[in-house]
Each structure stands twice: as structure tokens, then as C-alpha cells.
Image (tube, rainbow, N blue to C red):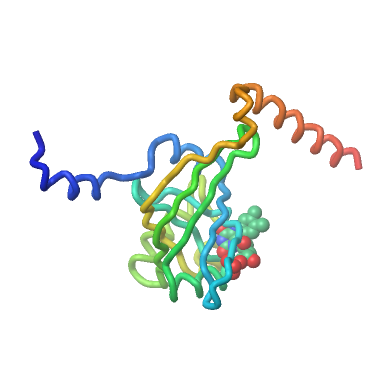
Amino acid sequence: MIPAGNVKAILSTVGLITPEMRRMVEEQRLGFAATICEDGTANLSPKGTVTILDDGHLMFADLCSPQTVKNLRANPSIEINVVDPVIRKGFRFKGRGIVVDPGERFDELLERFTSGSRAVRDAKARIRHIVVMEVERALPLVSPAYDEGVTEGEVSARWEQYFQELWEGRRRS
Ligand SMILES: Cc1cc2nc3c(=O)[nH]c(=O)nc-3n(C[C@H](O)[C@H](O)[C@H](O)COP(=O)(O)O)c2cc1C
């Protein structure tokens, strides 16, 4: 039995990122990152380098994200959404984004982008910063398409067909 006083401390160290979330983030290789501008307006931009650092953190490479980096330096609030466009499900991650400038920590994190499945071409020259996001809340996203009681297989089949036709049309044109 864990003493009540220790529960909060233990919970705060348990990662929020489940194996299912990890799988989706690594499969999709694309997240949309929302930050807040100085004037209070929203800023949303895609990040194809979004990846899992550990079970409490996401990260992405700043190749060309000046506004996101500027916003995070002033206000670390960030939300990243990752959605599978075929199964029409995903996850939304809310938390704090820390901009890691070139240095020792940056070099460690950069390793992830220099080789392997998440390698970025010419990473050392092109990556300006790495944004590490501490995930404070992680929630599933489910399309309203599921409201009608359809299965994941049915939704997937419909969108797989849609994308297949789209690509066939593009190849023909
Ligand atoms: C599919 C896609 C993936 C992208 N991935 C990244 C990325 O991982 N890192 C990055 O810095 N920019 C990436 N970009 C480019 C930025 O989203 C783009 O330069 C954007 O205007 C940056 O806006 P911001 O300064 O508000 O972040 C990507 C763009 C697209 C279309």
C-alpha cells in the first residue's frame, strides 16, 4: 500500500505517453504545433520531425520555425496534435515547450535526427534549435465520423479509398 502523501509525487513521475500514442506519433511523422504570439493571437504550423523523446516528452527540430521558437521563448504554452488521416483518430498533447539552443544538451538530442528512422538530411547544418515539449495532458482525438457507430475498419476503408483515388487522379494528370 502506497502512503497517500506519496501518491501525487509518484503520479507526477509516471509518463503520460502511452505505447499507442508513441506508435501513432512515430507512424504519422507529422504534428501540428500551436503556440501563442505576443499579441495573443494563435500560431499553428506543421512539424514533420515531431518524435517521442521519452514517455513524458515530445520533441521536434527547428528547421524553419522562427515564430514558434519566438513564441515559446516568451510563453512556453504549446499544444501538438497528431492525427492519422485514414483512421481519423489521433492524440492532442498539451504542455510546455522548451527551446534547446546549440550546446551539450542540443548535441545529445540532435543524435536522434542524424541517423536512423528520423534522420533529417544535413541535420547538423540545418537544425537551429530543438524544441522539447513536456507533456502535461494527453488526450485522444476521435472524428465525429465514429458518432454513427461505424467501426474503425469501415472508417479506414472509406478514407483509404479516398486517398487511393486522389493519388490515382494525380498520377494520371
Ligand atoms: C509537412 C510539413 C512538415 C514540416 N516540418 C517542419 C519541421 O519539422 N520543423 C520545422 O522547423 N519546420 C517544418 N515545416 C515548415 C514550417 O511548418 C514552416 O516553415 C512554418 O511556416 C513555420 O512557422 P512558424 O515559424 O510559425 O513555426 C514543415 C512544413 C510542412 C508543410
Q: Residue at x 60, y 29 (%)?
A: 146
Residue nearest the viewer, comparing 111 with 79: 79
Q: Residue at x 54, y 73 (%)?
A: 40
Determine whether, in the image, residue 17 is placed left or right of residue 24. left
> Is residue 124 left or right of 96 when viewed as pictured?
right
Apparent side of residue 140 relative to residue 57 in the rendered image (left or right):
right
Which image quarter: residue 83?
top right
- As drawn, the residue found furthest toward the right would be 173
Q: Nearer the viewer, residue 13 or 1?
A: 1
Q: Position of residue 157 (x, y in %)?
A: 69, 25
Q: Is residue 110 above or below residue 9?
A: below
The quadrant in which the C terminus is found is: top right
The quarter of the picture showing ligand 1: bottom right
- Quick check: can you spot residue 121? no
Out of 117 and 43, give the one closest to the viewer.
43
Total residue callouts:
0
Residue at 60 percent across and 57 percent down: it is 46
Residue 29, given in percent of the width and then of the height, sits at 56, 47
Quarter of the picture holding the N terminus: top left
**From what the image shows, is residue 50 above or below residue 161?**
below
Residue 6's place in the image compared with 169, above or below, is: below
Q: Is residue 134 left or right of residue 11?
A: right
Asked if residue 128 can be seen in this view, the reply is: yes
Residue at 54% from the left image edge and 60% from the top image edge: 34
Where residue 43 appears, as percent x and y from the top left, is: 58, 66
Furthest residue to the front?
A: 148
* Residue 159 occupies quadrant: top right
List x then y, in percent, for residue 154: 66, 22
